[in-house]
Image (cartoon, helix red, strand yellow):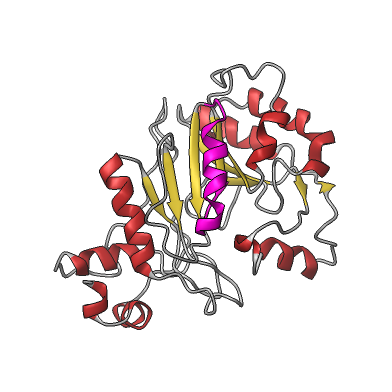
Amino acid sequence: MIDTKISWAHATWNPWTGCNRVSAECVGCYADALLSRCGREFDILAPTQTWRTPYQLDARAKSANRQAICFVCSLSDIFHADADRWRSDAWRVIRDCQNVNFMLLTKRPERIAHCLPSDWGDGMRYPNAWMGTTCGVRSSYHRVDVLRSIPCALRFLSIEPLMENVADIDLSGISWVAAGGMSGPLHAKHKMETTWAAEVHDLCRVQEIPFLFKQSSDKSTERGINGLSLYLAKRAGQEVDPATVPLIREYPETSLPLLPFVEHGKRFTADEFRRYAGTMARASA
């Protein structure tokens, strides 16, 4: 059975695990904490036994005449140098599973060109390989520039953990943006201001880029998933029910409809949102 605890993808696939920290967004890394609890050394990469997961998801999507989204390497980095020996097998899986869109998120976009398969060309032979990079601080803007240079069917940004104002980020050449706050024990120290997420959302609106809000900052993942919806409603002077307000989770257009998503996260109550976002004056600033 395919399952994931996240609400914005249909599955996660870790063909290997392990990584090492390379930038500010790596502070409080949940993958490091998880592997360490399992007795693993985080900086040692190792293959897993999960290589059938994409095929199972592909079969499920194909039987429904739909497509699915799979988040790749949530416990590693798809373009980590220590995974070079396994990556050709991963590309084969991606080629095989045409009803699955693979989110290939990396903090090492400078390695992408070196790691592409020999038949990559302009990337259109791999329409289901979505290339993304992490950019939660201004010092990572260079990653977006590198990503723009990669020929591919779709480029996306993970602005998570969002740790400062990035309202001047250049979104040219980007087809999807996801943003969210830090989870884990350092979430309070690196709290995401909802205004920062709103500014990125507004940029995407102007440029007609699909935008997905993942979560507010919290000890656990996917908490305050309605935080941006509540903020934008209050900014517009609207009263909404926190329990039913639509989440801001938009996806790129796909050739077939996507399988439905399951909402796993926890929503803010009105009181929780007020405590997180502060006063109404601040919300409307």
Determine if the magenta segment contains residue 171: no
Left or right of 134? Residue 202 is: left
Vertically, is 23 above or below 257? below
Q: Residue at x 72, y 30 (%)?
A: 114
Q: Is residue 205 left or right of residue 153?
A: left
Residue 146 highlighted magenta (yes or no):
yes
- Quadrant of the image occupied by residue 96: top right
Q: Residue at x 48, y 71 (%)?
A: 217
123 over 109 or under it: above or below = above
Q: Nearer the viewer, residue 285 or 87?
A: 285
Where's residue 124, x and y in %?
54, 19
Residue 83 on image: x %, y %: 80, 41
Question: The magenta stretch spans which residues?
Answer: 133-152
Identify the residue at horizontal 40%, vertical 51% (top origin).
212
Q: Is residue 239 visible?
A: yes
Q: Inspect this view and state whether residue 260 appears.
A: no
The x and y percentages for residue 27 are 64, 67
Total residue callouts = 0
Query: Which quadrant of the figure has residue 176?
Result: top left
Left or right: 262 as drawn, with respect to 83: left
- Which image quadrant for residue 92? top right
